[in-house]
Amino acid sequence: MKRTLYIILGSIFLLFLAYFAFVYFVPYSEGTRSGELIKFSKKGVFSKTWEGEISQGISGAQIFQFSVLNNDEELIEKLQENEGNYVKLTYMERYATFFFWGDTKYFITEVREAQSPHFRNR
């Protein structure tokens, strides 16, 4: 009886481990988005995560929400410095997320300053 219980518990643990590895290492999509960084904050009750938004249109009708992993300190600093500026974000979309990673499935991997198409130098 104990052996059967250990086999069941071990199988459940291995399935969870395989699911976690799949979600972490296999991206659903990768790409770039650009817009004005309008929000970047650390939020959460039990697990604090970094969340942000960029506005991709003049009216603010197109908002792209994203998350940043806590161990990407350089990325967090760049985003904090560029709040209110026009930025180009490289992101990775995952199949799912966990509460300790962030609220969205979009995770930022690179931040670059960009020139706004609305206010170009003539």
Image: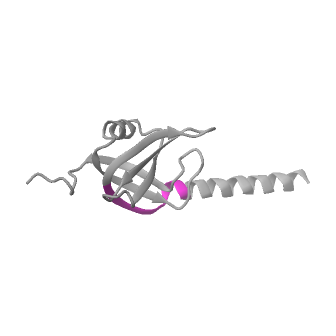
Q: Where is residue 41 in the image (x, y as percent from the top left)?
A: 46, 39
- Which SS type dominates the magenta stretch? strand
Residue displayed at 22% across by 53% down: 116
Task: Count up the numbered dots.
Answer: 0
The residue lying furthest to the left in this view is: 122
Q: In which quarter of the image is residue 73?
A: top left
Q: In which quarter of the image is residue 4?
A: bottom right
In-image side of 87 versus 39 (left or right): left
Residue 102 vs residue 94, the one in the foreground: 102
Residue displayed at 34% across by 41% down: 83
Q: In which quarter of the image is the N terminus?
A: bottom right
Residue displayed at 31% across by 50% down: 36
The colour scheme is one colour
Q: Position of residue 20 (x, y in %)?
A: 59, 54
Q: Position of residue 71 (x, y in %)?
A: 46, 38
The residue lying furthest to the bottom in this view is: 28
Q: Quadrant of the C terminus?
A: bottom left
In-image side of 33 versus 12 (left or right): left
Which residues, given as a range, are shown in magenta?
A: 23-34
In-image side of 81 versus 95 (left or right): left
The residue lying furthest to the right in this view is: 1
Does residue 98 show up magenta in the picture? no
Does residue 30 show up magenta in the picture? yes
Q: Where is residue 84 in the image (x, y as percent from the top left)?
A: 31, 43
